[in-house]
Image (cartoon, rainbow, N blue to C red):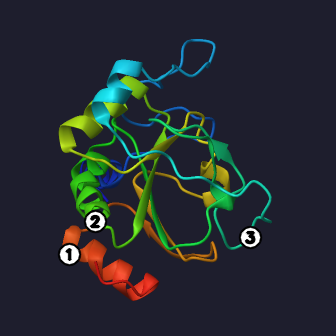
Amino acid sequence: MTRALLATVALAGLLASCGVGTAGDRVSGPGPGGGEDGAAASAPADLVAAAGLDRCPVSDPDVAARPDGLPDLVLPCLGEGPDVRLAGLRGGPLVVNLWASWCPPCREELPAFADLAATGAVEVLGIDVEDDPAAALTLLTEVGVGYPSVRDDVSATQAPLRWTGLPMTLLVDADGVVVHVVRGAVPDRAGLDDLVAEHLGITP
């Protein structure tokens, strides 16, 4: 294989998704929102108010984590609301989207998730990964996203969910079982609706 062809293949792989390394180093995009000491930046109150995101959901602190469910991690809300224990999200079907403002495919698919959430047919939760909170909130405001997101400032979800790049979407049933995983961007709103209908039994 020629060097030119190898370079083309490598570039295609990078464009397909945005990744962070196993140590939390970014493969593409700007640096994390934290300072040099790794401390996470706080979300500016004015941008939180401007975004007007729905409050983060209340999660069960006591229910046992499932081996086939979301990881037992507690993540802070990007907007307003309580910290969220992912493994404690039970009681209704849920679509979870891992994203970041520095990830071009994530930015492109956000409107599909916003439209899905607006139907009220299924709850949607974003997990904003290693992002600058101000950049994340500004993007959500521009796109018109209203559903809540939590912050994964140090890629804590990476090992338990075994992801190597963003975006990633998980469909979770009412019992907390992850019934389907999409690695990479969803094709479009119609494709997202099809996934929700097939795996969660809901027609948006």
Residue designated by label 1: 190
All told, the count of numbered labels is 3
Residue 71 location (% of width, % of height): 68, 58
Q: Mark 2 packing: few (<14 Cα in 10 Å), some, or many (20+)?
A: many
Residue 124 location (% of width, % of height): 41, 60
Asked whether, in this view, residue 133 is left or right of residue 62, the answer is left
Q: Mark 1 packing: few (<14 Cα in 10 Å), some, or many (20+)?
A: few
In-front residue for pair 199/53? 53
Q: Is residue 21 above or below residue 96?
A: above
Q: CB atoms at circles 3 and 2 under 8 Å apart?
A: no
Residue designated by label 3: 66
Q: Which mark is residue 116?
A: 2
User: How far, Cα to Cα, is label 3 from label 2?
Assistant: 26 Å
**Toward which corner of the image does residue 70 lie, by quadrant?**
bottom right
Q: Is residue 42 above or below residue 24?
A: above
Q: What residue do we see at 28% from left, 39% from top?
A: 140
In-front residue for pair 66/180? 66
Asked whether, in this view, residue 189 is left or right of residue 134, the answer is left
Residue 53 location (% of width, % of height): 36, 42
Question: N-terminal of the two: label 2 or label 1?
Answer: 2
* Mark 2 or mark 1, whichever is nearer to me: 2
- SS for dot 3: loop
Residue 177 location (% of width, % of height): 62, 75
Let me know if residue 69 appears in the view. yes
Q: Is residue 123 above or below residue 126?
A: below
User: How far, Cα to Cα, is label 2 from label 1?
Assistant: 10 Å
